[in-house]
Amino acid sequence: MFGRSVPLAHSLLRNVPAGVGLRRWASTKTLRETLQEVIPAKQEQLKKLKAEHSQTVVGEVKVENIIGGMRGLKAMLWEASVLDPNEGIRFHGLTIPDCQKVLPPAPGGKEMTAESMFWLLLTGRVPSPNESSQFSAELAEKAELPAFVENFVDSLPRTLHPMTQLGMGVAALNHDSQFQAAYERGIKKSEYWTYMLEDCLDLAAKLPALAARIYRNVYHPDKAIAPVDKNMDLVGNYSNMLGFGHNESLTEYLRLYIALHGDHEGGNASAHTSHLVGSTLSDPYLSYSAALFALAGPLHGLANQEVLRWQMAMQKEIGESVSHENIRDYLWKTLRSGQVVPGYGHGVLRNPDPRFIALQEFCKARPELQASSMIQLVQKTAEVAPDVLKEHGKTKNPFPNVDATSGCVLYHYGLTEFKYYTVIFGVSRALGALTQLVWARALGLPIERPKSYSMDALEKLIKN
Ligand code: CMX
């Protein structure tokens, strides 16, 4: 991958907005230097939008938006990615396959690293392999947890859901928030983003150690946790601390999963929560902790554990001879009992989720996954479910989303404790949410305060 010539990268990215996504092959700028380069232009862009277009109408608000969870309402600024209902996600203009081609992988690996995705989401630029590995080293330096957080997490009951533990641990890390300390000292608004950035990098660096500690406490309390390896990338270290460092396939899967799950524009419940809480000038630890509790809901991040539970129940009921017919029957049984089919549907997407497709490609390239009866069941279910959901007639998107397959691969590679899966999602979603906390402060975005109405007030509004 590193040997590829510059023109290929340029031709690959020819449809990408100017200045975005071009890999600077030999560059060794730090993340801070890169960010300092890109911030002034964005600040200028916002200033111009405010000055010239504050009153320009870009949409309308219908009653269905107000009573329908604000779906479709264009009401939020989010720089890192934009989700097209038909095409899926683009990160600063790059599709998932683009990112797989241009974002540097970890040494010895093929999948893009979380660090390179973080860099892209934060700066809109593709890091050079040098920049990416220097950034890995910086994060590894910051990765260790303060002793009081380790003790705090160790004191939690093993029966407490891992997501609750993760949210509590992240909130506790705000003890050392540089932003909060600087705010108390008194800093200029224009300096906010620099302290936010330090907190965001610190949290991104510490999340794997926190998440791995929770896993080991809950599921393998008798085994020691590997120390952080300063020469390893973020996800390599995470896998190592989870106890799967020997399992290169799982580590590669985690790299892919964490990078491509890193951001899904701003309106989803976890990203939006982080943005909302951050808009009050809460520090990144408190903002992201709140986001994690949004992620913990079964309609959002918990879906990946629900999919596995549901597919296993299906496998148990159907037995060995799986046919499209008996999958169809099982789908109808789920729907008739008033439950949703987990892993299907989406609030914005109206086509199969490209993240699902990328994970399926990962499976297709590995014979051991192709031979897994669970992965085969997931694939067969994806062949049948869209027609069943269309016939059922409720969901606006009958196609699989990323969670339809994500947990089954983890399970196959030995990470079988599916109550833990949303924690991995939580490590991932931090990439996008944290970068946008930095941007919200760099752009000086205000506290969020949409207007709400009671039904009586709404009826009055309609009459008038
Ligand atoms: N199975 C059965 N019914 C479904 C459905 C599914 N997978 N997806 C949507 N529906 C139903 C909704 O419950 C809703 O029913 P009511 O009118 O009775 O309330 C109706 O179809 C219309 O819903 P929608 O507009 O198509 O979807 P929403 O935006 O309301 O919800 C989502 C989106 C993801 C919550 C929903 O599709 C769902 O519950 N899916 C299963 C859970 C899941 O996989 N979540 C993971 C999402 C991925 C992510 O977080 O990124």
Image: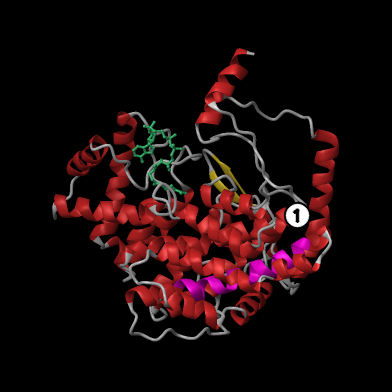
Which residue shows up at 36% across the image and 30% down it? Answer: 394
Quadrant containing the C terminus in the rendered view: top right
- State the colouring used for the structure image: secondary structure
Residue 3 in the image: x percent, y percent? 62, 72
Q: Is residue 219 above or below residue 402?
A: below
Taking the spot 32% from the left edge, 67% from the top edge, the residue there is 417
Q: Is residue 439 above or below residue 386?
A: below
Q: In this figure, which residue is indicated by the disc labeled 1?
A: 19
Please, what is the three-letter code of the amino acid marked with disc 1? Gly
In terms of image quarters, where does ligand 1 lie? Answer: top left
Q: Secondary structure at mark 1?
A: loop
Q: Which segment did they paint magenta?
A: 192-211
Q: Main secondary structure of the magenta part?
A: helix
Q: Is residue 204 magenta?
A: yes
Vertical side of 110 occupied by 347: above or below: above
Image-based side of 308 in relation to 129, left or right: left
Picture quarter containing residue 367?
bottom left
Q: Is residue 174 magenta?
A: no
On screen, residue 180 versus residue 106, left or right, reads: right
Residue 388 visible somewhere in the drawing: yes
**Quadrant holding the N terminus:** bottom right
Q: What x and y, as percent, mark residue 382?
A: 32, 45
Residue displayed at 63% across by 36% down: 74
Label tally: 1
User: Observer-nearest residue: 454 or 321?
Assistant: 454
| Residue drawn at (51%, 36%) of the image | 69
